[in-house]
Amino acid sequence: MSALPRHLHPGAWWAWSIGLGVAATSTTNPVLLGLVLGVAGYVVGARRSDAPWARAYVAFLELGVFVLAIRMVLQIVFGQPLPGRVLFRLPEVTPPDWLAGIRLGGPVTAEAVVGQLYDGLRLGTLLACVGAANALASPYRLLRSLPGALYEAGVVVTVALAFAPQALVSAAAVREARKLRGRPVRGPMSLRGVVVPVLEGALTRSVELAASMDARGYGRRAGTPTSRLALTGMFGGLLALCVGTYGLLDASTPDVLGFPAMAVGAALLGAALVSGSRRAGRTRYRPDVWRWPEWVVVAAGLVPPVALLFGDQGPLHPSTNPLVAPEVPLVAALALLAGIVPAFVAPRPPSALPRAALRTAAA
């Protein structure tokens, strides 16, 4: 572990969370998805700072639960019937002819509910991984670390990432104000009085951030347009990555459209970024360093997806028709547990330490 507290490079946190997200999308096994949630939550609890965006993980968890609940309700009310064990029956309504193909009510089977539960849990876990990256990585430090060729896109992403933390801060302030005035802060009746000021405040702060960054010429020099060669390389690289992804997902395509296409796309994209960054000169005040903890965090994020993508695929997708108890593949579980390494290796952020510990570390 690093002796002195410091902020880990935000690129390392995003690489780690993207690795966990790819692992989560590779399986519908609820046990493995629960491991991903546990690993992400433990690391966030151990290495998050006191910044406003550090509360984003809980918000993304709540969003995942909401998405899961919506999917379950839609499956129960409008889902197509699947053969199997009937749990209960809803009153069935026959839709008009112009809504042919839509089912409303009828029998609800355990196979359909469990299948939708697995898919919804996978989507909710992916949202939790995004929330972990938002809670651990400062969006402003991430913007400073982006290549110059991605400056405009980076500003847009930074403003978008700043929206969620600002919304959380505004929600806490609005609830506190309502509590002092004796108004309800929980329940459906309080939702209307909280949502509007929260959205207004978060949007206002995000627009102010974008305007202040643009007014100060934040890290950018005018008159340095990206060359046509760099733009062509970016477009070709992204196109090759899309073709490579399609080749990996469709087993009927030739092998050359899989990993080779992705390798060509990554090479083109990297060359275009390097070329474009040289034309867009930027200055950085105290740039974030990349040391061995960053490499370890990235490696801990790469182990789970590699183990799941190249391991035994059978236990990763437990059968829902017929229903069977999900197995726990040992290799995949151990690979997911490797994602917890950043909780012990990554340095603590300065704001997460008490003042006495900071004085001791500085001495």
Image: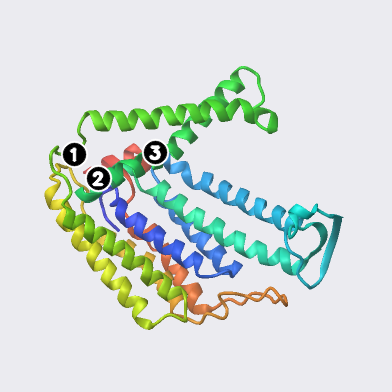
The circle on residue 324 is: none
Q: From the image, tell me which residue sits under label 1.
A: 219
Dot 2 crowding, Cα within 10 Å, few <14, some 14–19, many 20+: many
Q: Which residue is drawn at 86% across and 59% down?
A: 89
Circle 1 packing at 10 Å, graded few (<14), some (14-19), many (20+), is some
Front-lying residue, 265 or 49: 265
Label 2 sits on a secondary structure element that is helix
Instruction: Identify which amino acid the numbered label 1 is placed on.
Output: Gly
Is 357 rendered above or below residue 177? below
Q: What element carries label 3?
A: helix
The amino acid beneath tag 3 is Ala
On the picture, is 24 further left or further right than 113? left
Say which amino acid is labelled 2. Answer: Tyr
Q: Alpha-carbon distance for marks 3 and 2?
A: 16 Å
- Residue lying furthest top: 181
Say which residue label 2 marks: 151
Which residue is identified by label 3? 162
How far separated are the C-alphas under marks 2 and 1?
A: 9 Å
Quarter of the rendering occupied by the C terminus: top left
- Residue at left 30%, top 54%? 11
Q: How crowded is mark 3: few (under 14 residues within 10 Å), some or many (20 or more)?
A: many
Single out the residue that lies furthest toward the front: 98
Residue name at image x 39 percent, y 50 percent? 47
Instruction: Give the camera-side residue of 79 and 26.
Output: 79
x and y percentages locating residue 121 in the rendered image: 60, 60
Choose top left, top right, bottom left or bottom right for residue 141: top left
The disc, 3 or 2, on the residue closer to the chain's N-terminal end is 2
Residue 162: horizontal and vertical position, in percent? 39, 38
Q: Position of residue 222 (x, y in %)?
A: 14, 37
Q: Do the residues labelled 2 and 1 touch (CB within 8 Å)?
A: yes
